[in-house]
Image (cartoon, helix red, strand yellow):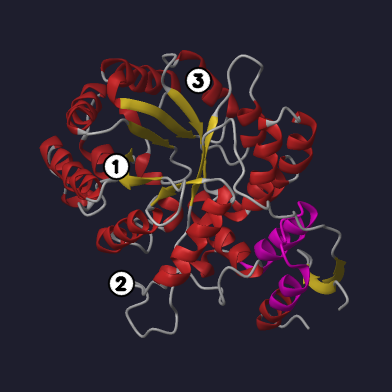
Amino acid sequence: MTLTLNLPAADGTATPYRLVGTPIEKPTSRPSFNRIAYAAAHVVSAPLIDRDPWNRPAIDWDTTMAFRHHLWSLGFKIAEAMDTSQRGMGLDWVGAQELIRRSLAEAKTVEGADLACGVGTDHLAPADARSLDEVIAAYETQLEYVEKFGGRAIMMASRALARVATSPDDYAKVYGRILSQAKDKVVLHWLGDMFDPQLTGYWGSSDFEKALDCVLSIISQNKDKVDGIKISLLENSKEIALRNRLPQDVLCFTGDDFNYAELIEGDGTRHSHALLGIFDAVAPSASKALACLASGDTETFRAVLEPTVPLSRKIFEAPTQYYKAGVVFLAWLNGHQTHFSLPAGMQTARGILHYAEIFRLADQANALDDPELAIRRMKNFAGVYGIE
């Protein structure tokens, strides 16, 4: 099969593109890392089930669980029911409960499998939130559910809290109450407004330094209950500022899908661990790179992981909250699902030029696992847009 196809360009033409990448080989056994690496995993829709695709989309649970086995086999922990799985953008709390329950049960069947689950307030509509106590009660409901099935929590940022809080003290009250009740240590979650505009002013201020002071104060007051904090602001200097001020036993998890390679490698004194949506899309590359880093082979770590950064920057370009479409696009190209559709029709959030560039960058990053399959599927997809 010829590895050439026509792809659209911004000037309205379609030009031949020939693949240049080499697929990353899979490990023969589950690798070990010297960084904690969570992959935030997507869910797979079931488009052939006739249900309400916008409000209660059907989920293909078997394929969704199979993808988690794929990530576990590559050495990753899983950050379950996070924004990558379309929490609040196609997957409601009812769906998230089933996802959490199924994934926790599935993990028990796999030696060494580990995961932590997103705990939020998304069953409380921000417009309906009237008080901090309502936000606390919403968090408690979700924390109780996760812990009932033996899960650990990632405390997600709350749209409802962003709406009703009027000061950093309000955040301290809510987080203090929830952390005091958690059975295990919790990972906090600082998600920037580029991922969710409703989180503008989180931690009580739109000024980074003031927000940083607030979250560090919360961690200091509850450090026996905080395992770490995931920060997703897409600015490495802000993550480094947080990382340098964390207590020694509190971990920094990078959620920076623009700068993760350098942040994971670190500066020789401090480094970040990982809790990343992009690891869903480039799991074989990330697995090989992290295994090389653990063996002291920094050169190969960089050679494998750095080419994935331009791809990630494209997938997570503004409006960033629609990055899920690019993640699932690659899962389809790489054979992890039989269709390219997302819950709530989110595949329509990006256009053909975006997807064509993802295809090029994925090839150049060696992130197409089966080039012949990827070509066939990309040709079919481009044909829908009139590109032969």
Q: Position of residue 170 (x, y in %)?
A: 20, 27
Q: Position of residue 382 (x, y in %)?
A: 70, 77
Quadrant where the image shows the N terminus: bottom right
Mark 3–mark 2 Cα distance, whole angstroms, equals: 39 Å
Viewer can see residue 205: no
Quarter occupied by residue 70:
bottom right
Instruction: Write the residue at 54% across / 62% down.
Output: 325
Mark 1–mark 3 Cα distance, whole angstroms, equals: 22 Å
Amino acid type at circle 1 is Ser
Amino acid type at circle 2 is Arg
Quick one: label 2, few (<14), some, or many (20+) residues within 10 Å? some
Q: Earlier in the sequence, mark 2 or mark 1?
A: 2
Instruction: State the SS at label 2.
Output: loop
The residue tagged 3 is: 243
Count of marks overlaid on the render: 3
Mark 2–mark 1 Cα distance, whole angstroms, equals: 21 Å
Amino acid type at circle 3 is Arg
Instruction: Write the residue at 77% across / 68% down.
Output: 371
The residue tagged 1 is: 158
Q: Earlier in the sequence, mark 3 or mark 2?
A: 2
Magenta-tinted stretch: 351-377
